[in-house]
Structure formats: C-alpha cells, structure tokens
Image (spheres, rainbow, N blue to C red):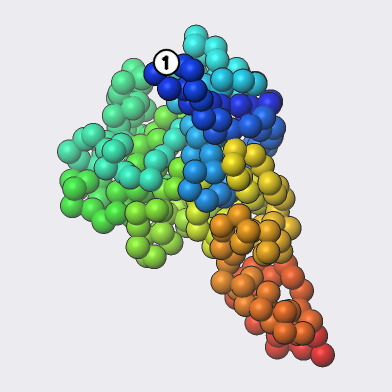
Amino acid sequence: MIQTTNLTFEYFDENKENSNKVLNEINLNIEKGSFTAILGRNGSGKSTLAKHFNAILLPTGGKVYIKNINTADSKKLFEIRRSAGMVFQNPDNQIVAAMVEDEVAFAPENLGVAPSEIRRRVDKCLAAVNMTEFAKSAPSKLSGGQKQRVAIAAVLAMNPEILILDEPTAMLDPMGRSEILNTIKTLNRDNGITVVLITHYMDEAVNADRTIVIDKGEIVIDGSPKEVFKNVELLKSLGLDVPQVTELIYELRKNGINLPDDILTVEDCYNAIIGGIGK
C-alpha cells in the first residue's frame, strides 16, 4: 500500500543555499490491512514522513508510492488523497462545518457523490466511530476525543484504504486517548483499513502489528512491538520511554529476576510472575 525508496527530504532556506535534512534515505513497505506505529522523539522526522504518505510533502530525493502511484505525479494527486486519508493531532484544524453530520458529508459533497450515497456514508462512518447519537450536535460542544472521532469519520467518508494519523491523541486526556485508540483498532480489525499511527505514546504502539522507530531522519528499529520494546537501553538512549510493564520487567531483570524481556501487557506480566518464571 505504501512504499518508499531512498526517501530523502530537506528544508531549504529562502535563498536555497542552506538546507536541513529531515529524512535520510528511508526505505520501507507497508502492507495492506496492517497496523503500523511510527515512534520518535520531537524532531526525529516522523511527522514529516507521515506527510509524504498522502503527498502533503514531496521527496527532495527518492520516491514514495501509494498503491503503486508515484506521489510526484501531480495528475494523480486526487487519487492518492482519496486512497490515503490523514488525521492530524488537533481536530479543530480539520473541522469546518457547524453540525457533525455536515462535517462528515463535506468531502463527499465536494467530490460530487450522489446525495443518497452521501447519506449512506455519513450514517456508516458515524456508526464506525460510535458517534451516531451526536449527528445533529455542534462540534464545538463535543469533547476532544469526540471531535477527533468526528475528524476520523470525515476522512472515512472519502472511502480511503489507508488511514494516516499524526499524533491524534496528543491533545487528549487518558479517556479520550482510549476512545481514539479503540476506534483505530476497530477500523483496522473490522474494516481492513491500513493504519499508520504516528505517536509518542509507547502504550499505543503496543497495539500495532509493527513498530518503526525513527531518529534523526533514519529508521533505527523496525519490527513487532515485542521485538522493538525489548531494546530498552537503546530506546532510552534515543530519548524515548517504553511501556510501563516493559519498564517494570526491565528493572526486575536488572535485579536478577529471570523474566522474559518481551512482555508488553499487564496480563502477560502477571502470568509470568504468578506462573513462577524465574524460580
């Protein structure tokens, strides 16, 4: 669904004499129906990478393909953005309508979709994010988590095959974060939507099929969450945390308690300790 080949991106000053390289020869493939989390500290390049996935930014070197379409092909821009929808961290920057159902209908209306089909999409997308009862509500009256779910529904109304979320829970409280993460998992699991989640919350990345860690514009670690988070010392050296359970296991192992180093959940931690592993 997404492929990058030697993807490089540089910001240039006004005179184009000096540049700041943000991405350095990124090579990756993201498969259809997968759930990929991309981690990195502030300034690592993770959000810049995400913006290449629906051609908000174009490479200054290398190539990016969305469903085998080169993002540099300006004639295909509309098709790319229909395939790869993007949700940003602040829903207020995306919501334009005065009523929730009008917000979800906005993009299909501008695409010339038939009214009956728009109605079907609005109902389906609001149901998908559990916001049907708020269809007639004003977005300004909603909580942060509810607004973000509306923003996701509005993107889903374009029938994208890929959902790119750039730190969608950064401005939310724990309850709002949980709502959004559950919505994302459901869309991936039940609707088969390919998800790319940019986040700095380690506990969110645990839910992904694949976790990619970026630092200084380069991929440092790429693997399953279990494979990635066992590298506690490396992650800390990159200015990142690890899930709380992983941190606990790491400290116990340092103190001579023989437990597996790939535990990510409270349940697995409990079973490992109660099961007598390490005796």
Please state which amino acid type lies under the numbered disc 1: Asn
Q: Is residue 78 above or below residue 158?
A: above
Query: Is residue 121 in sight in this rendering?
Result: yes
**What is the residue that sits farthest to the top in this orientation?**
75
- Front residue (pair 67, 238): 238
Q: Is residue 36 above or below residue 270?
A: above
Q: Residue at x 61, y 55 (%)?
A: 238
Secondary structure at badge 1 equals loop
Asked whether, in this view, residue 262 is left or right of residue 99, the answer is right
Crowd around label 1: few <14 · some 14–19 · many ≥20 (10 Å): few
Q: Residue at x 19, y 48 (%)?
A: 140
Query: Is residue 4 in sight in this rendering?
Result: no
Q: Which quadrant of the structure image shows residue 266?
A: bottom right
Mark 1 sits on what residue? 15
Q: Residue at x 74, y 70 (%)?
A: 261
**What is the residue that sits farthest to the front in this orientation?**
17
Position of residue 120 measured from the top left corner of the image (x, y, whole percent): 36, 34
Position of residue 250 measured from the top left corner of the image (x, y, whole percent): 68, 74
Asked whether, in this view, residue 256 is left or right of residue 4, the answer is right
**What is the residue that sits farthest to the right in this orientation?**
279
Position of residue 38 measured from the top left corner of the image (x, y, whole percent): 58, 46
Of the 4 image quadrants, the one containing the N terminus is top right
Asked whether, in this view, residue 163 is left or right of residue 150, the answer is right
- Front residue (pair 143, 8): 8
Position of residue 116 measured from the top left corner of the image (x, y, whole percent): 32, 27
Q: Is residue 40 above or below residue 26?
A: below
Count all numbered tags in the image, as a single digit.
1
Q: Residue at x 41, y 39 (%)?
A: 87
Q: Is residue 277 above or below residue 102?
A: below
Of the 4 image quadrants, the one containing the C terminus is bottom right
